[in-house]
Structure formats: structure tokens, C-alpha cells
Amino acid sequence: MIETAKETFMKILSIVEYKGDREDFYKRFMNNCYSKALLELSRVAPEGKRDEILRMLNIIDSSEDMLLLLRETFGEGKFETVLAQIIRKEIEDYVKRLIPVLTEEQKVGLQSLSEDICCEFLDTVGIEE
């Protein structure tokens, strides 16, 4: 999911003609997703573990460290499931915020991307064919 998310996100940035540093934007996007995954998973963690997780969140400064903490704390399966849900929602939210300012050509490009990757996330944000 993570590599697919990166590929999808980079294609979105290309379609919308993002002018900034795409790699940096993606890293910040993923750090945000990791933080949200950590917060979500900490809600279901036992009380003592929750405090430790939240303390760690305050000192972690890289996505790699956050990824390691999430996997160690919750296991690969639970982590991947929650992270995939969050990435999908964050991509949906990002595209929703972009739609009002996109050209028709960009909207069509996003629709094509949605069809190419066989998922409905762009369909849920009101892009018409």
C-alpha cells in the first residue's frame, strides 16, 4: 500500500501540476498519515501503552522511526490496515480540496487515474465523467 500510495500521490501531483518539491510534499503527507495512524492506534492501546506511544510521538522526528514504532507496537497487519485506511482518506480529502480550483483537463486526468488504478476514491469526491 505504501508504494502504491506514493505512486498514486505522485501521479496526482503531476496531474494537478504541483509546482513545489513533490518528494518533500509526499514525505510531509506520509508523516501526517503516520501521525494519524499512531494516534488512531493509541486510542485502542492499553492505558500504559497509550501513554508511552503518545510520549514517543512527541520525540519522533522521522517517518522511518514512526513507521518502526507503529510496526513494533501493533504488529504489521494491524498497522498496515489502519495506515491504508488513513492514506486513502487523506488522499480523498486532498483531492476534495483541489477539485474547486482544477481545470476540466485536470479533473479528467484525475478521473482517468481513478479508472487506471481501479479504485473509487476519486469517484467519492464528485468528479463527473
Image (cartoon, rainbow, N blue to C red):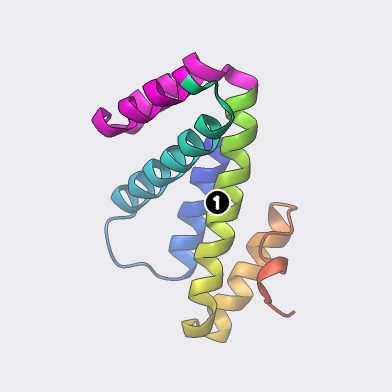
- Residue 73 vs 90, above or below: the answer is above
Q: Which residue is mark 1?
A: 8
Quarter of the rendering occupied by the N terminus: top right
Q: Which residues are magenta?
A: 48-77
Point 72% across, 80% down: residue? 128
Q: Nearer the viewer, residue 52 or 61?
A: 52
Q: Where in the figure is residue 14, as x and y percent of width and height? A: 44, 63
Observer able to see residue 64: no
| Residue drawn where x is 37% and y is 30% of the image | 54
| 33 left or right of 19 in image | right
Q: Inspect this view and state whether residue 70 appears.
A: yes
Rendered location of residue 19, percent (x, y): 30, 67
- Residue at the image position 56 percent from the left and 71 percent from the top: 96
- Name the residue: 28% across, 29% down: 60
| Picture quadrant of residue 21 | bottom left
Q: Is residue 11 above or below residue 49?
A: below
Occupied quadrant, residue 57: top left
Can you give x and y, in whole percent of width and height, for residue 70 in the image?
47, 24
Is 57 placed above or below 74 here? below
